[in-house]
Amino acid sequence: MVDITQLQHLAAFHKYGTLSQAAEALHISQPALSRSMQKLEEELQVSLFDRQKNKIRLNHNGQLAVDHARRILESVQDMAEQVQAADRRSRTISLGSCVPAPTWTAVPALSNLYPGMTISSEIQEMPRLLEGLRSGLYQIIVLPCDPGDNELYCQVSDRETLFLTLPPGHPFAKKAETGMYLEELDGETVLLFSTIGFWHSIHVKLMPHSRFLIQHDRATFNELVNTTMLPSFMTNKSIRYFGKKNNRVLVPLLNPETSIDFHYICKKSKYPKLKAFFEQLPGKE
Amino acid sequence: MVDITQLQHLAAFHKYGTLSQAAEALHISQPALSRSMQKLEEELQVSLFDRQKNKIRLNHNGQLAVDHARRILESVQDMAEQVQAADRRSRTISLGSCVPAPTWTAVPALSNLYPGMTISSEIQEMPRLLEGLRSGLYQIIVLPCDPGDNELYCQVSDRETLFLTLPPGHPFAKKAETGMYLEELDGETVLLFSTIGFWHSIHVKLMPHSRFLIQHDRATFNELVNTTMLPSFMTNKSIRYFGKKNNRVLVPLLNPETSIDFHYICKKSKYPKLKAFFEQLPGKE
DNA sequence: ATGCCTTACGTTATACGTAATTATT
DNA sequence: AATAATTACGTATAACGTAAGGCAT
C-alpha cells in the first residue's frame, strides 16, 4: 500500500523541483528520496516522472498524483486535528454564563469534583449560551431565567443583586438607606468593568443616555474606583469575592431587574455525569 | 506521521470488533495488531479505545478516527485508480467510429505507427463520438460528415457504399444491374450484423416496416447468409475485407444515404502527435 | 477450559546514509 | 569543476511472529 511519507516526499519534490533540494528540505539524503519515489511508482504501477540522466521531472501521471497526494495529506492532517480536538472536548467541562459571578465559585468546584478535567468558562449572551449548550460547546450554562426546554435540566441556585457604589461625597450617596432607581442616574458618566455580560444590557436598557467608561483591566478599574468620583457598580457576589471598597457607599437599587436568580442548566442526557456538581450548588435562599 | 496501514488496521478492527478476528482478517498476528493500534494512539496523542483487561472497544475518539480513516483509505484507493487510469489513457489511442469499416484499416495502421501504444476502437453514435472526443475518451473519431468545429481537425478519406446482397433466386435479384431504392424492400425481413453503427439507423429510417434479424456472432451471421434466402447487406469495404459471397448477387442502392465519406477527426491540439496517421490515410477518390 | 489482550524477546526486513558512478551544464 | 540523479553496500531501526502471562466468561 502507498505510504504517507511517500506522498509527503512527492509533495516536497513538486514544491522544490529537484530531488536534491526536496531531500534537503525533508532532512533525508538524496538517494533515499530517489528510492522513495521509485517505490511509489512501483506501488502505483505507473511512471510518475520523465527521467533523463541527471534530470527528473513530473510527467502527467505525476502531476495528477501530486494533486491527490496533497488532498490526502490534508485529510490526514485533518484527522489528527479533529480527533485531538474531540479528545480535548471530552476532557474539558465548559461553563458558559450570562454574568461573571457563577464562574468564580463553579470553576473551582468543578475542578475539585472532576479532577483531571480541564474547566473552561466564558461570559456570553443568552442566545449564544443556549445555542452553545445544544451544540456541545458548553456542558453547563448559567442564565437569569428558565429556558423551559424539556430536553434541559434547570436548577435555580443563588441570587445576585446589583448595587451602585459611590464616593461618600456624591450627591446620591445619601440614598444609601432608601435605595434608588437606576433611571435616576441616567445621563451620568459611569465606570464599568468589561465582561459583565447580562449586567451590561441592564445598564444600557435603564440608563440609555449615560456614558460608560469600560475598563478591560481589573487593576486599572480598581484604581479608577479608588481615585475618581465616578459612580460604579458592585454586586453582593463581587463584594464577597473581591471585598468591599472602604471609600465607597453602597446604594441599593430598587429596579426588579437588578436582582437575578442563577439558573444552572445542562442537557438532561449529561445530568448523570454532572450530578455531583449540581448537588453541591447552594440552594435558593 | 500516521501510517496508512495503521488506518487499515483501525478500519479492520471496527469491522470485526475484536483484535483477534481483525488480525486474522488482516493476515497478521494479534500482538502485531495490538501494537499497531497502540502506536496509532501514541501518534495521535489520543486514546482511541476503552481497555479492560481482556476487552477492547472503540471510544468516542476511536469512532471519529474510524470515520476519518475510512475516508482517507478511500481517497488513497481513488488516487491509485485514477493515476493508473490516466496512465492507461496516456498509452492508448482510442478510435471511435460511426461504422465498422474504418477500424479495420485504422487499428492496424495505428499499431504500426505508434508501437507500444494500445489501440482501442469502438462503434458509437455520432453525438457520443463528438462528446467523447471532447472529453478525451477518444483521440480520433470517424463521422459521415464534418462537424464544423474550429477546434477540430477534419480530414475526408475513403467512401463506403452499401449494397444489398440476395441469393440469385430472389425476386429482386434481377435489379443487380439497374440498382434499386431501399424503400422497395421495406416490410421484408432482413438479416443484419450487429454493431454496424450508422448503417443501422439508415435501415431503420428507410425500411421502417421491416423486421431485422440481428446477429451478434459473425460466424452465425455468415452461416445464415449462406443457407437462407434472407436479404442482407455488404459494402464495398466489407467485401474487400471479408470477401464477396459467391452465392449472392450484389444489388446497388440508389439512395444517396447509402454512401458515406469517412471524415477522420481529432482535436487540433492533438494533431501533431497524430500527423503520421492522418498522412497515411487514403485520399478522397 | 477457552477466548482475548498485552508484554517480552529474538529475528527479519526494510529504509536509511555513505560512497561510488554517470551524465549534464 | 559543480550539480544532479542513480546504483551499490553496509548498517540500524522498527515491525513482525512466537512464546509467555494475566484476566475474564
Image (cartoon, coloured by chain):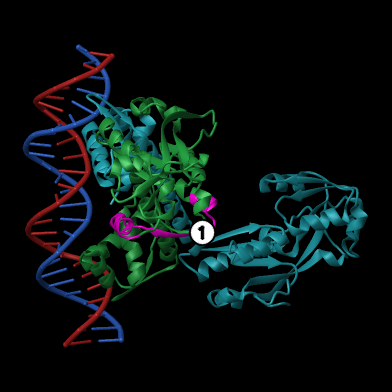
Chain colours: A cyan, B green, C red, D blue
Which chain letter matches label 1? B
Quadrant where the C terminus of chain A sits is bottom right
User: Crowdedness of circle 1 by 10 Å Cα count: few (<14), some, many (20+)?
Assistant: few
Specify whether residue B89 is in view. no
Residue C5 as seen in the image, left or right of residue A280: left
Task: Residue B284 in the image: state x and y as whole percent.
Answer: 42, 27
Task: Tell me the quarter of the picture where residue A235 sits.
Answer: bottom right
Residue A145 as seen in the image, left or right of residue B162: right
Residue range of the region highlighted in magenta in the rendering = B203-228
* Amino acid identity at mark 1: Gly
B209 in magenta: yes
Q: Which residue is mark 1?
A: B187
Task: Residue A219 in the image: state x and y as whole percent.
Answer: 67, 46
Task: Residue B174 in the image: state x and y as whole percent.
Answer: 42, 48
Task: Tell me the quarter of the picture where residue A143 sits.
Answer: bottom right
Across the whole image, how many numbered discs are drawn on residues? Answer: 1
